[in-house]
Each structure stands twice: as structure tokens, then as C-alpha cells.
Amino acid sequence: MSDGASPAPSTREHGIPWRRWSIVLHRDVGYLAVALTIAYAISGIAVNHIADWNPNYRVTKTFTTVAPIAATDANVIVTTAMERLQLTDAPRSSFQPDSNTVQLFYKGTTYHVDLPTGKVMVEATRSRPVLFEMNQLHLNHSKRAWTWIADLYAMALLLLAITGLFVLKGKNGITRRGAWLTAAGFLPIVYWLVFLR
Amino acid sequence: MTVFRPLALAAAFIALSATTAQAQGKNYGKQLTLKEKTSISAILKDPKAFNGKRVQVEGTIVEVCEERGCWIKIASDKPFESIRFKVEDGVIVFPLDAKGKLALAEGVVKVSTLTKEQAMAQAREMHKERGTLSKFDSTKYTQSITDVQIMGEGARVKE
């Protein structure tokens, strides 16, 4: 991004002032891209390590025991399980995966009750605040209009990369120090091509 | 300051649209096209008759892939039965809080035969994900099994 300096006048007296335009575009598009860049960068790190943790949800499993349930009628099983667990609200729904188990589904919490033993696993699911939303945006779960917004953002990044090359002149410009650093930026791609592909 | 009024109006419009859409249920993937529903119990009773056929099923979501939201299990209309609705990773992502909600889902039935070892590995993985590894009984897997799932294309999840 720009160093905050006012756009320098073009070195050419005639024709299109490319450098001036580069600086202006780099500065203003840079401001516009700040919010999404932060969201995408944080979420990028989070989802990169999906094998080690769940970046969207915090799932906690706790265990408790109630008296065994001997009923066989599905409705009676559900009401008995609710009583034993001291749940007053009706569940969103329930399911018996087998004759020995009943699952009660509440918003954010599922109770897995083993009927013959009364052992209960309480599975609570909470979305990770902010990170969940950032991941949704990054992975474009919403589709629809977000696809276009994400495309626009990608084009903005492209513009930032290109205009960034021409912001500075002199020893720190693209023809000297900038050339070396830009070339160094290609090293991760070369590393991937040679060793990881 | 004049910039804030249109921004506030836009935010209010987005919030209102979101509330309306949520009341109708949330759509995932392709739009549902089939007019008739097929009962899950019918598919599970004679899976080979449905192999390769596009079906629309309805039932409670009883399980969601914890890691990627890339599959859900939908309860059958008969007790103790459910079917896996598998979607392409990243194309459709079901949220974990869809558990217990009603799903109307469309896709193609896929029937495959799993070897004893494959069936055992799949079951072990499921138990691991659920945190019920102690319940996993490897002696139950003595022969190859028929695996039935729906390769999902689109779904609507209602409250």
C-alpha cells in the first residue's frame, strides 16, 4: 500500500500519468480492501489447520447418568428421557438409531441416551464467534451474490499487486530493490512446484 | 455524514431479506426439481432397484459431518433407519446446527459393496467422530456389506 504521501506528479509532461494513477488506485482500493483482507487472512490460517481443530464450531461432550429407561414406545421413551434429564422444553425432534439409544435434538445440544444403562452423552455445539462468519465468507458457503463480491475482491487484490509495483521510484522502486523482493515472492511457488506438487 | 444514511438503509434491507429467507428454510446446492418424494424406507428395503436413480427424500437430520459439513444423515420414516446424504466437499456445507431440523433433499442413489475391512474402518471412523469409540464392536463386521447413500445435489433445510 502507499506510504500516505500525496500522489507524485507524473514524470511525463504529456500522455497518461501512469504513476499518479497507480498511487491513487493503490491507496483507495487498499482502503476498501482492508476489511476483507483481515477476514480472509484470519480465516485462511484457521481453515488451513482444519485437520487439527474445528475452526467453525466448539463441540463439547460431557457425560452423565440417569436411571435406565425400560419403555419401548417411542413417545414414552422421549418423555421419560426428558423427565430423567429434567428437560422442560420439547426437543426440536428425536431419533432412535437403534433400539437401545434415543437422541434428543435441541438447538445447539444433542442428548444421546443409552436406554438400558442410562448413560447420557451431552453434545453441545457452539459456533466460534466472528471466526465462524469469517470462514463462511472465505469459503463462500453462501454462494449467490457473495461469489461476485469475492470475485471483485480478488480483482481488487490483483489491482493492488500491480499498482503496488509502481508506487515508488528510485532505489526502492521496481527497477532496483523492488525487483529483487518481487522475484523473492515467487520462491514459494517454485518450492511448491519442485518439492510439493 | 451523508454517507451513513444510505449505508444504514442498505444494512436494514439486508437484515430484512435475511429474516424473510430464513423463515422459508435454507437452500443448499442446486434447486430441487423432483415433484414426488421417495420414502427412505423404500430405498433401504430394495436399494438395487434405486441404484443410479435421482430421488427426493424427506426426514429429520440426525447427524452432520463435524469436520466439513460434507454429509448429513437423514432419518427414515421407519424406526432405527437412516440414510447418508453425501455432498461434494466445499460445494455444499451443512452447518452443525442443522441437527434435528427437517430436510428435503435431492440426489442420486449410490449402492456399493464394502469389504469387511472397509466397513469396519468406516464404522470406527464414525464412532471416533461421535466420541463413542468405546461402543465400537469390531466383531460385528464378519462379511462385506451393502452401503447405500444418496449423492446429494441440493437440499432445503427447514426449522
Image (cartoon, coloured by chain):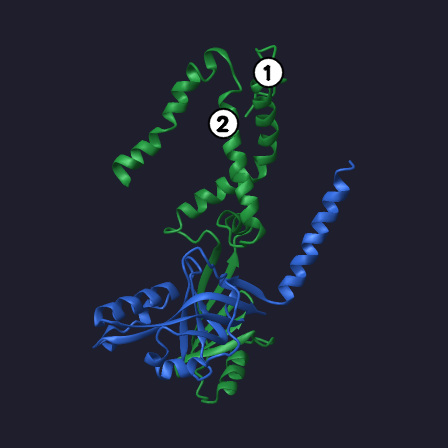
Chain colours: A green, B blue
What amino acid is found at the position of numbered circle 1 in the picture?
Gly
Question: Is any part of residue A64 visible from this angle?
Answer: no
| Rendered location of residue B111, percent (x, y) | 32, 73
Q: In this view, does A180 lie above or below A160?
A: above
Q: In this view, does B4 lie above or below B106?
A: above
On residue A162, the disc is: 2
What amino acid is found at the position of numbered circle 2 in the picture?
Ile
Task: Indicate the quadrant where residue B142 lies.
Answer: bottom left
Pinpoint the chain carrying mark 2. A
On residue A15, the disc is: 1
| Identity of the residue drawn at 42% across and 63% down | B87
| Rendered location of residue B78, percent (x, y) | 44, 84
Task: Indicate the quadrant where residue A23 lies.
Answer: top right
Say what secondary structure mark 1 lies in: loop
* CA–CA distance in space, label 2 to label 1: 20 Å
Pinpoint the chain carrying mark 1. A
